[in-house]
Structure formats: structure tokens, C-alpha cells
Image: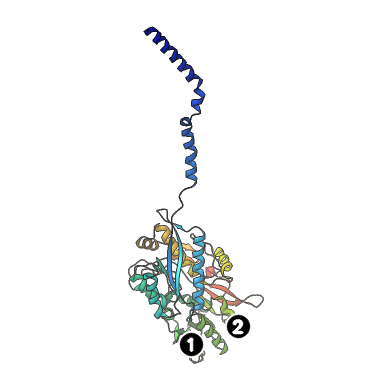
Amino acid sequence: MKRSLFNLFAVLVILSLALAACGAPAVEEAPAAEAPAAAATEAPAAEEAPAAAVEKTAIVGFTASLTGKLNVESTRQNNGFKLWMDQVNAAGGVPLADGTVVKFDSKFYDDESNKDRVQELYTKLVTEDNADFLISPYSSGLADASAVIAEQYGKIMVTTGAASDSTYQKGYTLVYQAYTPASAYLTGSLDLLANADAAAKKIAIVHENDKFSTDVVTALEAYAIEKGYEVVLNEGYDSGTTDFAPIINKIPADVDAIMGGGHFADGQQFAKALSDKGVAAKFISLLVAPPEPTFAEIGDAAFGIVGPSQWEPLAAFAPDYGPTGAEFIEAYKAAFGEEPSYHAAGGYAAGLILQKGIETAGSLDVEAVKAAIDSEDMMTFFGHIKFDTSAENHGLQVGHSMVYVQWQKDASGALVKQVVWPLEGKTAETVYPIK
């Protein structure tokens, strides 16, 4: 019995082995054998579709003179800043160290060119609109008023369209200047005059009674005296002045040069008034107005007028950060249908300063971005950018230099701007004397 059971068991074992051998191909096709291959095909699919980067919007707050006497310059500054913001956002934003991508939006109000409104509006930008960063309004006086709020609420602010030195001598640590300081605005005009005529000695200074213009001519007068010039007149006029005859009558007939001015509207009108009254100065250099393309609307009264410019389309800087001058000009013309002035370029440059700071910091943290902007030393299409980081002048621009333009006539007799100073950047010889 046991033997029979053994024999039966042996037969069953043999049959099992035979059946297993016959089923071998089925084992290779079994799901368990395919599982590793299936997993291998699924893994690359997951790598090809990574989770989308987290986006964050940084709000940049500012006021602008949509109305008021500073409307022309302010509008162009805003255009330049908007172009920067639109381009950065279209390019995908600024990546941070944690993988977040920052894009930008703006919040702004019309300050009506009114200093009294600025502090109220900047306080609103910070406390109600939750602005992450600030850009200054156009003009030194309005920027100075907004800087107080930026520092008070711990917000980084880039000032553009604001050249007065004094804003950066108040102990602020978060305010950064894009423009060449006012103290260097017209000193180059004296250097140009000396190069054109070493015998010229008598200078009349006529200027707007505002913070920016007063800072400029204070430095100009000190430099003129240092260089041996005689300042035969230093006269201010109220903002909004349109009748310049009384002040022109005070200018001595034998003056060699007239320097000063203020902003666009008054500068253009002053230049026309000098021409209408037949003032025979050999050299005239005015603030702000001459570099504007529309300055030439006064016709022959614009001929020969020199003006300091923060930037000119003719300037051929080789940037190591941001677009080239040609790229900026092309994009600006496409967006706004006009040639950019230095006010537009300054608005764009303010964006570049902020962008570089955030990129270097890899963060939106105020202290990290502050440290990054403190260390900026870059060449842009706008020119060299570098800041004083001393306690006495923190945020003062020390890298950027002025260029000086003069309205001349081309072969067809049309008025055109030429760069006449510094000599290494000139595109034409200085017309001298102009009368």
C-alpha cells in the first residue's frame, strides 16, 4: 500500500514538472515579470512634466505727474519703467534661490507735481497697497519727500529723475540714486567752455528756485569761482514763470556765458526769450530742457544751446548687464512711437538696478536686496552704475557721468542734437560762439 502510494506520488511529481516545463513561456509574459519595465517607462514621463514653478508678484509702487508742470519728464520716465517691467515679465520673471519666480506689477497715483501729495500717497502705497519696492517720482523735490516714507517703512526705493545730492546725506540706508548727482550736472559745461574759449571769464547764472536747480547752480558757482570765472549774476525765478524779460534785462551785455535753467517748460521758454530779446551770449547751457527731442520746437532759438544729459541715444556704452542702447531704443520706439529721452532711459535703468539686486540676492528680503544693491558695479546702456555706501552719502550715485549735447544743424539745415562733451564721446565739434 505504501509502495502504491509512493508510486502514485512519484507520478504526480513527474506530471507537475512536465506541466511546469510546458508553462515556462507563460511565466515570462506574466505581469510580475513586466512590472519593472512598466515602472521604467513611467519614470521618464514624470521627469518630463515637472511641477510648475511657483510664481510671486512683487508690487512696485510710485507716484507720477500725470498732470502738473512735470508731466512731460514724468511721463517719459514712467514709459521707460513700464517697458522694463513688461520685458522682464515677458521673459519669464526673475528666479529666486528657492525656485520661486518673481514677476512685477505696479501701483501708482497722480501726484499732480505736488509735493504735499507725495508723502500721503507713498504712505498709502506702503500701508494699503502693500508695495514691496518703491520708485521715486520725477524731480528732486518730490523724490526727497518720498524718500522719508521709504526709509520710515523700511522699503527699498530707487530714485530716478532726481539728482540732488542732499537726499543721500540724511542718513538713509534704503534709497539709491540712478542719476548723476546735481553737484556734477553743469560743472562739465564749464569744462566745455574752457576748452572752447580759454579767454571767456564772465558767467551769468539764471535758475529756477526749486531744490534741484538750486543744488545744481550752488555747485556750479563754487566750481566757477574755483576755476577763476567771474559770476556776474546769480538770479532765481519762481517755478511756473513764463515772463523772463525782467530777469533777462539784468544780464550784463558783455557776458560770455549764460547757465542755469530748471525743468523742461521753463527751460524751453527761457531759451526762446533769450533769442527773442537778441541776447548775444557766446555760450548757453541749460538744465533738463535741451536734451528733450521736443526742445527743437522753438526753432532757431534752440540752435547752439547746450544741455547736460544723463543719457543720449548717440551714447555707445558697452553694457555687461541688460540690453544694449540700440535694443532699448528699438523697443521703446516700438512701444511708444517716439525716440526715448534720458528721462525714459532713467526709468528703465531704475528697473535694472532693482532687478539686479533681486537676482543677486536670490530673494525679496529687504536686507538681502539692500546688500546686493550696495555691491552693484555694472555697466548698462544707461552708463556705469555704482553707489556710495558710506554713512555720510549712502545711496549717492558715484558711477554715472553726464554727457553734453548741443543743438546744431545738419547738411539740410535741420536741427539735430550732437554730443560735444566729453571729448572722447563727441559726435561733432562744439559750435562756438553761437552768436
- Image location of residue 405, percent across then percent down: 54, 74
Q: Which mark is residue 59?
A: none
Residue 241 marker: 1
Task: State which quadrant residue 128 falls in.
Answer: bottom left
Which part of the image, by quadrant, shows the C terminus? bottom right
Q: Quadrant of residue 395?
A: bottom left
The amino acid type of the residue labelled 1 equals: Thr
Image point (40%, 67%), residue name: 131
* Viewer can see residue 42: yes
Q: Is residue 34 above or below residue 241?
A: above
Mark closest to the chain's N terminus, 2 or 1: 1
Residue denoted by label 2: 300
Say which quadrant the N terminus sits in: top left
Is residue 320 positioned above or below 181 on the image?
A: above
Q: Position of residue 364 (x, y in %)?
A: 39, 60
Is 105 on the left or on the right of 325, as rendered?
left
The answer to whether marks 2 and 1 mark residues whose Cβ atoms lie closer than 8 Å is no
The answer to whether any part of residue 225 appears in the image is no
- Image coords of residue 92 (percent x, y): 49, 57
Q: CA gap, disc 2 to disc 1?
A: 22 Å
Q: Nearer the viewer, residue 95 or 432?
A: 95
- Crowding around mark 2 (Cα neighbors within 10 Å: few <14, some 14 to 19, many 20+) is some
Give, as a three-letter code, the residue at label 2. Asp
User: Crowding at label 1, few (<14), some or many (≥20) Cα neighbours within 10 Å?
Assistant: few
Question: Between 174 and 112, which is closer to the camera in this rendering?
Answer: 112
